[in-house]
Amino acid sequence: MVSTTHVTVELTEDQVEAVGLPPGHGYQITGMLPDTEGEPVELPRVGTLTVPLRWLHPMDTPVSGGHHDASLRGF
């Protein structure tokens, strides 16, 4: 989870029609969300974390001495 000031909103088909865009394309609006004073609002966003398959191992498998487990470091 990360904080971001940018948001993406998917338009409904009614909104697409209201602004005169061709239907059926899954339009999105991406931008910054300001508060009432014009300052950016920070929102939580879940990001995808991709790791190489070779990094994964069963919990009961011994790992090399150079292995660093982030879960043991509080991450």
Image (cartoon, rainbow, N blue to C red):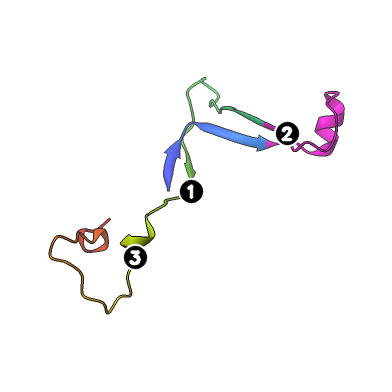
Is residue 26 magenta-colored?
yes
Q: Which residues are magenta?
A: 10-28
Of all residues, the one furthest to the left in this rendering is 65
Q: Quadrant of residue 63?
A: bottom left
Foreground of the two, 39 or 55: 55
Q: Residues within 10 Å of mark 3 (few under 14, many from 20)?
A: few
Q: Which residue is mark 1?
A: 46
Element type where label 2 sits in the image: loop
Q: CA distance from mark 3 to mark 1?
A: 21 Å
Q: Which residue is mark 2?
A: 27
Above or below: residue 17 compared with residue 66: above
Q: CA distance from mark 1 to mark 2?
A: 21 Å
Q: Residue at x 83, y 26 (%)?
A: 21
Foreground of the two, 75 or 33: 75
Q: Nearer the viewer, mark 1 or mark 2?
A: 2
Q: Residue at x 31, y 61 (%)?
A: 55
Q: Which residue is mark 3?
A: 56
Residue 9: image location, x then y, percent = 65, 36
Is residue 34 magenta-colored?
no
Q: Earlier in the sequence, mark 3 or mark 1?
A: 1
